[in-house]
Image: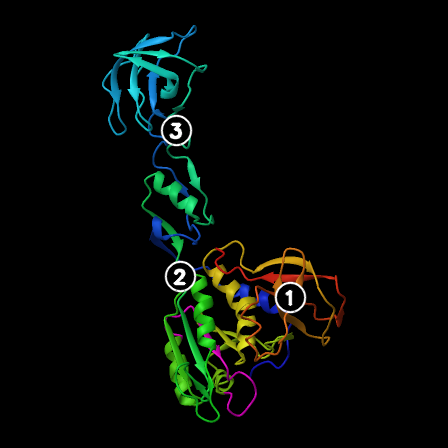
Amino acid sequence: MLPPQFISWADAQRIVLEHTPRLSLESCAVEWSGGRVLGESVDSPVDMPPFDNSAMDGYAITWSDPLPTEWTVIGEIPAGKWPDRVVGPGEAMRIFTGAPMPQGADTVIQQEWIEQDGNTIRLTRGHVLKGAHLRGKGTQINAAERAMEAGSLMTPGAIGFLANLGIPTVSVPRRPVVDILITGSELVKPGQPLQPGQIYESNSHTLIAALREEGISPREVSHVEDNMDAFRDRFNQAIQGADIVLITGGISVGDHDIVRQVFEEGNVTTHFYKVRQRPGKPLFFGQVGSTLVFALPGNPASVTSCFYQYVYPSLRKMQGYAEVFLQMVQLPLTGGFTKKPGLTFFLKALAGPDAVTPLSGQLSYIMRSFAPANAVIRLDEDRETYAAGELVDVHLFGYGRS
């Protein structure tokens, strides 16, 4: 039997993370690794730059003190060509950005400071410093030096850096395999006509969009009517190879709440059932083998709230992220709020730089207020009233955040 007691929001998050494993590593082309976490540290296979080269178009010379004011040009070095001449005192070679420095040269004079007459160049302005405009071999990184540590986020800059070192692939935790099961005989796909007693199904759309924000495409999305045998069969299929199964609806205590009844048959280990929170009290978290099972309430706002408080951190831990929770800040309330004590409240909200405003329409069936929301306000379980201007915890939706 499922345990009847409710647990706190904090305990529920802790239990979810305790039972969430980190997934195995896979090889990923570096250019497609954006937003993922490096699973293994990377050492540079080369010195970078691999040779001394010019940082700009100009003339490569041997610096001396005093410095001559004119030199004889003995050749030219375009990028990609290795120099075949040695530069001696009083000599120069025309050089272009990125081209290798010739032997004997240690300084580049930028072309804007030079006048040329045949094979002779003259310094007409500026003060030339030794080593000017020279990119030294290994000045960015040396061969065998640590380039990036395991756990680093693969940002565009990180991808460019590793590609610059000639690294074609990286090891990253694989993406979680997720199945979605939507229960409810009354649900109809958007675009179809509604018959009496039917409503449009939106939970799968919310969950698919939330998963894709994390770079995850669900393996299977199924709508199951309120039939025990049909749900049991589909659930048994889902747990084959899935890391997470997300279920919406059917987890309360009604006669047609088939999800809970199937779980009670004994093949699902219960980690918790019911959380002292609003919305989303009848939340189930359990496990079959290595597959985590989240049974979310059917009301759309409850599904969205529970996803970001529990499923989201589980997915991120699986993929090796150091920060697994929504970003949390403290902001003052624009107005007072009164809540029921004994429950943690999550309020759909608009967060600005200086304050946060609860939106109207906080009931669990209302998604209209989730549409403009960029945050949820978390109100403590043991509190009842909050005054305008009081600081509250605000969980920010990081849409597009990696």
- Residue that badge 1 annotates: 377
Residue at the image position 56 percent from the left and 80 percent from the top:
365
| Mark nearer the N terminus (1 vs 2) | 2
- Residue that badge 2 annotates: 175
Residue 290 placed where, x, y %? 44, 69
Residue at the image position 49 percent from the left and 79 percent from the top:
248
Vertical order, 147 against 379 (above or below): above
Vertical order, 81 against 12 (above or below): above
Residue 57 placement, left or right of 257: left
Kindly report the distance in space between the C-alpha atoms of the residues bearing marks 1 and 2: 29 Å
Locate the N terminus and report the quarter of the image it occupies: bottom right
Provide the secondary structure element on which disc 2 rests. Answer: loop
- Amino acid type at circle 1 is Ile
Snapshot quadrant of residue 48: top left
Residue 119 placed where, x, y %? 26, 12
- Residue that badge 3 annotates: 138
- Amino acid type at circle 2 is Arg
Residue at the image position 33 percent from the left and 43 percent from the top:
167
